[in-house]
Structures are given as C-alpha cells and as structure tokens.
C-alpha cells in the first residue's frame, strides 16, 4: 500500500478530509461509496482513519476500502490505556496489545514500551493499514517530562521496528496526544520529532472543542500545528469537525472527524469510570445530530428538524448532492452520516479548486461570514416561533482565528 501513497502526493499537499470510522459508520460509508443511483458515482474518499476496536472485527468495509485503493490509517487507541474505562469495554478485548491494568506514569519500562510499540504495528499490518500509526501515551500536564520520555521510547521503538523482523516497511506516522502545557510549548515536541525518520504527525489533543474553546486557545492550537509543519512533514489534525476547513485555509492540509458528531477531543471523558460517566451523561444522548453546510455547524436533531420544517428557512438549506438529490429532506436524520460525508467531500473539493493559499483563505472567510448571517436568520425565525435557537458564537471565534493567523502570515 506504500505505492498508493507515492502515487497520491495531493494527499499530503492539498486540503484533505479523512472520515474517522467507528462501528457506527460502516454502513453509512458503504452506501455513500456506492452512489445514489446506477448512473451516479458515489462519494470519493482520499483516505480514512479507522479506530482499532472497529478494525479488529474485520468488517466488510475494510475490504471495500482496500479494493477501492483508499489509503487507511488505524488509530491504535493506546491513549485509552491510561484510564480505567477500557477495562469494561468488550471491544478492547479484541486488541492484542491491550494491557491488563491501566498504564500509570510510573509503570512503563523500556521493554514494555518497546513491546507495545511493536505489537501495535503488528496489529496494523494484520489489518492491512496503509501507514503505521505509532503507539502513543497522553502528554499529561502533570509529570509532563516523564510522559515525554515514555513517548520518546515508544517512537524510538516504532522507528526501529519498521521493516525489522516480520514487519513490512511502511510510512510511519508519529502520534502525539498533547495536553495544555505541551501545546503551549511546541518546541518540546518539534525538537523531539526532528530526530526521527517519520513521514507525518497525527495530533489528537487531550482536551479540545473547536465550537466551545475561546479564540486564544484555538490560536495556540493552530500555531502548535503550524510549528510541526516546519519539520517538512504533513500534519493530521484529529477530531476537529468543521474547524478543519479553517485549518485547511491556514495550511494544515489534513484533518479527520467522525460522521455528523458534535466532535471534540476529551480523553478524560472517555477514560472516566463507567459509573461516573453514566451519572454525568448527557440527557440528549441519542439525539441524532445533522450537519448543515450553510451553517458550518452540526446541530442537534431537535434544532435541525425545527429549521427544516420551517418552510421559509428550509429553502436556505437545500442540498443537491448525492445524499439528498433524490430524497429531499425526508428522513434526513436517518441518513445523517451519509449526508455529512457527501457534504464534507463537497467542501473539500471547493477548497482544492482554489489554486492559491490566499484564495482558500478568502473562500473559507466568505463561507464563515455567510454562515454567521444564516445563523442570525435562524435564531430570529425560531425565537419568533417561541423556540430557543441554537448558538452560533463559534463562527465569530473561527473568523477571529482566521483573521489573526492571516495577519500574522502577511506580516512575516
């Protein structure tokens, strides 16, 4: 599969969206790839990120992606091994490198880390990943120097194992899971990564929510990603949803997100003990979210339905892509994942069609400005009907991030 990457340089240099595939997404992706009719092509994937717990089940989708020549990256989910939650999740039992107890800052040894790194790569080879994505542990703010050392040993062992023994040589993508302090000191990461023969960097922060975080935090995150690009390797930003379009405009070519989720990075929430998580779970759990391109927002099913059932508003959100062309808005919640994939692919194609960085910045700025105005119209209309409309304040923050970073680049 390394030959595929050699034939696809645009994967690393042009705006690229990688769907994050879980057990909930397989059928939606299969249907989107198939196309709406016999005479229409399906959605085109530049690649995909597959969670290891899903890949371990050997789903039919893996064969479909392989047949279609779609490059595949497998997230080993090793950051989850530092919490207790994975011990209660049956899907983790299928992973051959699953530990019997949570990994703490004082428990790893050089040999255990080397074994973990190699076992992860062996699993990725078994499921025929196109790249190796290295095992990684969280860079927690507490005891950051120790966690940095653990990750250095994992990356060193991964580089040594590539093409050694029974492992084929493949492109190696280093994974990092930075906390607040690590993001605030990008030189800590850049200086370390510069010492290794890697082909890319996959960044999955410990806590990041692009629709809720403030401008300063988002700017710091963007600058962290841009600092890594100084190594001359592609950077993949994980779980950023529509904020990935802003990153694309700012030169971060690749991002991933789930299909139609209100996506955020929150390892603490994922690692929470089961009883605690159940008692603090969202009351809106199960509310099927829908992404509306004109708002650049994934809305709760309740809010999306209120918009689409309002005749004056609905005309603003017509979708003519393969997901909706022959179906209109009927049962959109049932095919929300296919809809998300089609729309995101359409957005990325529009960015790729702009030949210069400035043209891409202008396009994303125009789209965000239109989304801000559409959001105001939606809120006014729903408020007049006695319904509390959704909040679109994140659009203003994204515009501010884009403006700040554009001014910085122009000044440089």
Image (cartoon, grey):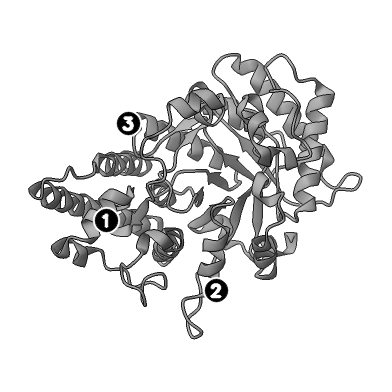
- Of badges 3 and 1, nearer the viewer stands 1
Location of mark 2 (residue): 34
Measuring from the top left, give residue 107's x and y in whole percent: 74, 16
Asked whether 91 or 249 is in front, the reply is: 91
Measuring from the top left, give residue 286's x and y in whole percent: 41, 45
Q: Residue at x 56, y 62 (%)?
A: 27
Residue ranking furthest to the right:
165
Q: Earlier in the sequence, mark 2 or mark 3?
A: 2
Give the quarter of the figure containing the N terminus: bottom right
Q: Residues within 10 Å of mark 2 (few under 14, many from 20)?
A: some
Q: Residues within 10 Å of mark 3 (few under 14, many from 20)?
A: some
Location of mark 1 (residue): 305
Location of mark 3 (residue): 214
Question: Is residue 105 depicted above or below 32 in this figure?
Answer: above
Q: Residue at x 37, y 59 (%)?
A: 333
Q: Earlier in the sequence, mark 3 or mark 1?
A: 3
Q: Residue at x 63, y 16 (%)?
A: 145
Q: Mark 2 and mark 3: span between their CA atoms?
A: 40 Å
Q: Earlier in the sequence, mark 1 or mark 2?
A: 2
- Of badges 1 and 2, nearer the viewer stands 1
Question: Is residue 114 depicted above or below 13 in this figure?
Answer: above
Q: Secondary structure at mark 2?
A: helix
């Amino acid at each position: 599969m390394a030959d595929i990457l050699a034939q696809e340089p645009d994967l690393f240099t042009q705006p690229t969206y990688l769907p994050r595939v879980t057990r909930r997404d397989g059928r939606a992706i299969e249907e989107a790839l198939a196309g709406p009719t016999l005479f229409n092509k399906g959605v085109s994937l530049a690649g995909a990120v597959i969670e290891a717990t899903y890949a371990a089940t050997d789903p039919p989708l893996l064969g479909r992606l392989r047949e279609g020549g779609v490059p595949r990256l497998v997230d080993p989910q090793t950051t989850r091994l530092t919490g207790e939650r994975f011990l209660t999740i049956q899907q983790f039992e299928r992973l051959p490198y699953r530990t019997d107890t949570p990994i703490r800052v004082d428990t790893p040894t050089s040999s255990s880390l080397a074994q973990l790194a190699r076992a992860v790569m062996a699993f990725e080879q078994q499921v025929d990943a196109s790249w190796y994505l290295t095992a990684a542990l969280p860079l927690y703010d507490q005891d950051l120097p120790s966690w940095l050392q653990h990750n250095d040993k994992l990356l060193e062992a991964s580089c040594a194992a590539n093409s050694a023994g029974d492992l084929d040589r493949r492109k190696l993508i280093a994974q990092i899971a930075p906390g607040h302090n690590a993001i605030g000191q990008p030189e800590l990461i850049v200086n370390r990564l510069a010492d290794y023969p890697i082909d890319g960097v996959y960044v999955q922060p410990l806590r990041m929510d692009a629709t809720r975080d403030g401008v300063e935090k988002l700017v710091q995150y963007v600058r962290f990603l841009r600092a890594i690009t100084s190594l001359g390797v592609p950077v993949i930003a994980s779980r950023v949803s529509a904020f990935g379009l802003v990153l694309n405009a700012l030169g971060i070519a690749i991002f991933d997100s789930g299909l139609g989720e209100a996506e955020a990075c929150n390892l603490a929430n994922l690692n929470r003990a089961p009883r605690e998580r159940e008692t603090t779970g969202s009351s809106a759990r199960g509310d099927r979210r829908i992404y509306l391109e004109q708002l650049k927002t994934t809305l709760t099913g309740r809010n999306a339905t209120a918009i689409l059932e309002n005749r004056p508003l609905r005309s603003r959100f017509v979708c003519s892509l393969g997901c909706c062309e022959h179906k209109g808005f009927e049962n959109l919640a049932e095919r929300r994942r296919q809809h998300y994939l089609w729309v995101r692919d359409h957005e990325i194609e529009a960015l790729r069609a702009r030949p210069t960085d400035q043209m891409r910045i202008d396009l994303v700025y125009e789209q965000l400005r239109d989304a801000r105005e559409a959001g105001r119209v939606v809120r006014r209309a729903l408020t007049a009907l006695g319904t509390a409309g959704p909040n679109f304040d994140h659009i203003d923050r994204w515009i501010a991030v884009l403006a700040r970073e554009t001014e910085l680049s122009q000044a440089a």
